Amino acid sequence: MSGLTHRREVEVVGLLVAAAHRYDGRPDPAYGTDSGVAAVQVRAGVGVVGDRYAGKPAHRDASVTVLAVEAVEAVAADLGAGPFDPLLLRRTVVLRGAEVEALRGQPFALDSGDGLVLLQGGRPAAPCAWMDVVLAPGAHAALRGRAGVRCAPLTDGTLRLGPAVLSSAVPLDPARAALPARRAARRG
């Protein structure tokens, strides 16, 4: 893909297809999570086949969410809790080795062996207040700025657990994967 000149080996450590909204209303004390899957089918302009946001007009530009597992691990360490199951955050794709927050507003592609799946990074995937119940007290605030990125799928394809290549238009620093998004410099 033209313009995606920065390539990085990553690992897809979690994939989630969620048919229903788990944290609607009050989560059950035995909340659990949906089981992860080994592969997801992505459809351009639609989302992930079987997911609650697939084909919904309001979510067309945000039907795939991507999260860095390092952010979840850092929050657990910061709170002295965990380890947390990263699927409890209900993101579609969980990666290891990528500065996901730098992909906001950027095109990028993931290839886990079945060809490129092109995505357009969009707005942040803000954490919901239920993270204080589901993970640990303080998790909601600790996840701000590092709870992932909402993306629009631009091509059809399959993503699988395991090794993958992430291609992006911007350089990514894996050492920043656990950190909140960089804030834009203030203009005076």
Image: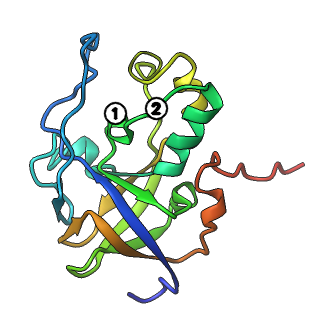
Q: Quadrant of residue 78?
A: top right
Q: Which mark is residue 127?
A: 2
Q: Quadrant of residue 110?
A: bottom left
Residue 57 visible at all? yes
Q: Is residue 55 left or right of residue 68?
A: left
Report helix, strand or loop for mark 2.
loop
How many numbered markers are drawn? 2
Q: Considering the image in quadrants, where does the N terminus appear?
A: bottom left
Q: In the displayed structure, would residue 164 be above or below residue 134? A: below
Q: Nearer the viewer, residue 93 or 31?
A: 31
The local crowd at label 2, few if under 14, some if 14 to 19, many if 20 or more residues have their Cα within 10 Å, is: many
Decide: is 185 above or below 161: above
Give the left or right position of residue 25, taking residue 164 as reference. left
Badge 1: residue crowd in 10 Å (few <14, some 14–19, many ≥20): some
> Residue 58, position in %: x, y?
26, 41
Residue drawn at point x = 24 percent, y = 82 percent: 115
Judge whether 47 appears above or below 76 on screen. below
Residue indicated by mark 1: 88
Dot 1 lies on which element? helix
Q: Nearer the viewer, residue 187 or 139?
A: 139
- Give the amino acid at mark 1: Leu
Q: CA distance from mark 1 to mark 2?
A: 11 Å
In the picture, residue 176 is in which quadrant? bottom right
Q: Is residue 94 above or below residue 171?
A: above
Residue toward you, 15 or 128:
15
Residue at x 39%, y 66% (from the top left corner): 11
